[in-house]
Structures are given as structure tokens and as C-alpha cells.
Image: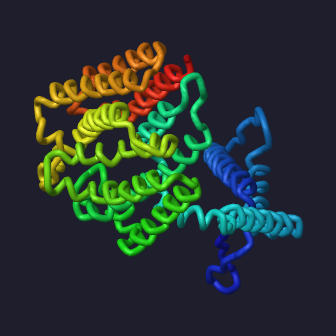
Amino acid sequence: MALLSVSHHTGVLSLHRQGPSPRQLSARSQAISTSSQAMAVLRHSQHRGVLPLRRHGPSPRQLLARSRTISAPYQSTEEDEMTEEDEKTEEDKKTEEDKKDSTPPPVSWVERSLEAALPYARLARLEKPIGSWLLAWPCMWSITMAAMPGTLPDFKLLALLGFVCIPMRGAACTVNDYIDRDFDKKVERTKNRPLASGVVTPTQGLYFLGFQLLLGLGLFFLLQLNNLSRVLGLIWLPLVSSYPLMKRLTFWPQAYLGLSFNWGALLGWAAIKDSLEPTVLLPMYIAGICWTLVYDTIYAHQDKKDDLKIGVKSTAIRFGDSTKQWISAFGTATIGGLALSGYNAGLAWPYYPFLTAAAAHLAWQISTVDLTDSADCNRKFVSNKWFGALVFSAIFFGRLVA
């Protein structure tokens, strides 16, 4: 605060740059107010010719003298200057500390690598493992069914083939997103996918596809499978990669997806037996295709409106309001095919109670799904991993009991 004082010698205003503290200013204002009151009392008493009695406090003259003393120009002391400097120093320190706290820590190479890999993980749908489960279950069914009565299945083969399904499913998703990248931009659910949004370029997507195929095939051949299994594995590749094209050609792309996603039923049996048993595998393979028609038709209802706008075909559009009747028929065929396959394979009685539980789960899906609710369609779709687990348990215990 700067105080203005009148110079009696020069007749000009001079500015005192160093002023009193806020407390001193408050005290001064109170004193000035008090002096004003004293002057008023003094003038009143002079006018009447008498002095008022002082009941409390100092006389008006004393108050006037005190106010003049307080209103004198303030001279700052060394103590005041030191206090101001200390306050400035503390404020500077706080400002520097705040700047240090707001500075982000350096990013490590691990964080940079993970950040760069994240779009590719999303491209392979690693955050949504349901696809890998749906691809792996038919493999596991047939491997377990191919075991000798009263024995456990080959857990090493189960684990390795299950692991192979991860890059194979990732490759299928990459092919799908590469071919559909222009369509995906127009669909609300898929517009933020890495290729559709431009986070991953088409060239980078192709390189990543090659990496996944090499990884999957490398692991596949490291299993040292028999020649029949290797041939079936090579046939599997074009089935998986050509599925996205079917959405442009037919209203039954879900049936074609069933052909590729259930190919593992043939592969798993061949890896154990080095042969194919049509009476066991054909009912299982057809049952798997019908199962795929159930869960992927439910899944396709999420995008039904967008697919109609952009011209993509699906069984959800083909079935329309009759979807539940169609998938009920496919669900019945699924359970019938699995029952026939287990019977022809000579599975023991525990197979059938577990299969009944799987049938109940499938019936629950079909009867309760709200095909107009995208979130509910997705929940029912994801729940199919438990259907696959129930069928696996049925085969496991049906084979284990001699």
C-alpha cells in the first residue's frame, strides 16, 4: 500500500513506496475515526463555552494528538523488510516445489513398448478371449473323446492346441478387420477398432497378420503331429481367412464361420488316432456348426441396423422376427448331434447328465435373450464359453468312467 502525503515545501504529492502492514493500516483508520469524533466533540464544547465531562477514556485533545502521531508517514523497519523477504522466499520455494511435483516422471522403455503394442493387442482381440474359447472347445472335445476308456486325455496336447488357437483366432480377427475396415467405420460398435480408426495402418495390419500366422503354424508344427493333422491344419487356414468375404456374398456367413471354427473337432481326433471316424466326428462337427449358428446369430443382432444400412448380410437379417424359432431348431440339432456322437464313441453314463445341463444352458440363452438389446446379446454370446465347458465335462467324465 502506498501512502500519499502533502509536502509543505514543494506543494506536490510525493509517493511513499514502503507502507505499513495491513494491521497498522486498520489501527490507523480506527484512530482517524476516533480523532474525527474527538474534533466534533471539541467544536461542540467550544461553541457552548464549556468542556464536556470525560466519563471514559482520554480527552478529545489527547485523541487528536494521538491521531496525528498515527497518521505520520510510516517508516518501515529492518524487521518488516526481513519479514517480507522471508515471505517471498517461502512463496518462491512453494512455487518451485509445485513445478517439480507437476513435472511428469520419465516414461520407461517398458511403458513405451506396452503403449505401442496395445493397438495390436486390440486388433487380435486379446482383451476378449471368448473367441479363443469358442475356437478351442471343439478341439478339446475331440481330443478328450479320442482318449482310451478309463484314461485321462492328453493334457499336453490339450494345452498346446489350446494355445495355438490364440494366434489363429487373432489372425482371423485381423483378416476380418482388414477386409471390413471401410464397413467398420460406419458401424457404431466397430468404428474404434484399430484399422477402422487409423491407429494401425493397413500395411501394419498385414505385417501383424503374417506374424500371427507364423507363430500359429510354428507352434503347430512344433507339436510334431502326424501328417493327417498337418494337412487338416493347412486346410484350416483358408477357411478362417475367407470368412469375412462371406458377409458380402450370402445371408449365411454364420454357417461358414461354423465350418472354420469347428474344424478343430476333426483336427483333435486326428492328432490322437491318426485317422478320422465319421460316425463320431460327423455328428460332432455338424453339432458344432449348429452351435455356431446359435451364438453368432445372437451376436449379429448387435449390428443388425447398421448392417442393413451398409449392405452387410447375416443370419440375423435373414431370420428377422423369426430368429428365436430358427436358433431353437439349431440348438436342438446341436444337442442331438452331440448325443449321437457320444453314443457312437461309447461314452459312459456321466456323459448324459452333463449334456442335459448343457442343453438347459442353451435353452436359457435362447429363451431369455433380448434381441433388441445389444448388451444382452453380448452377454448371452459370451456365456457360450460355459456351454463349451459343460460339453467338455460331459465327455471327460463319460470317458473316464470305464
- Residue at 37%, 46% in the rendered image: 263
Visual colour scheme = rainbow
Q: Position of residue 194 (x, y in %)?
A: 39, 62
Image quarter of residue 357: top left
Query: Where 120 falls versus 397 (above or below)?
Result: below
Q: Position of residue 386 (x, y in %)?
A: 44, 28
Q: Is residue 118 left or right of residue 361?
A: right
- Residue at 38%, 21% in the rendered image: 343
111 or 396: nearer the viewer: 396
Q: Position of residue 101 (x, y in %)?
A: 70, 61
Q: Residue furthest right?
A: 78
Image quadrant where one finds the C terminus? top right
346 or 104: nearer the viewer: 346
Query: Where 398 falls versus 298 (above or below)?
Result: above
Total number of numbered discs in the rendering: 0
Image quadrant where one finds the N terminus? bottom right
In the rendered image, is residue 113 in sight? Answer: yes
Image quarter of residue 371: top left
In the rendered image, is residue 103 in sight? Answer: no
Q: Is residue 28 left or right of residue 389?
A: right
- Residue at 88%, 70% in the rendered image: 78
Q: Is residue 232 left or right of residue 1?
A: left
209 or 381: nearer the viewer: 209
Q: Position of residue 94 (x, y in %)?
A: 74, 62
- Residue at 53%, 63% in the rendered image: 117
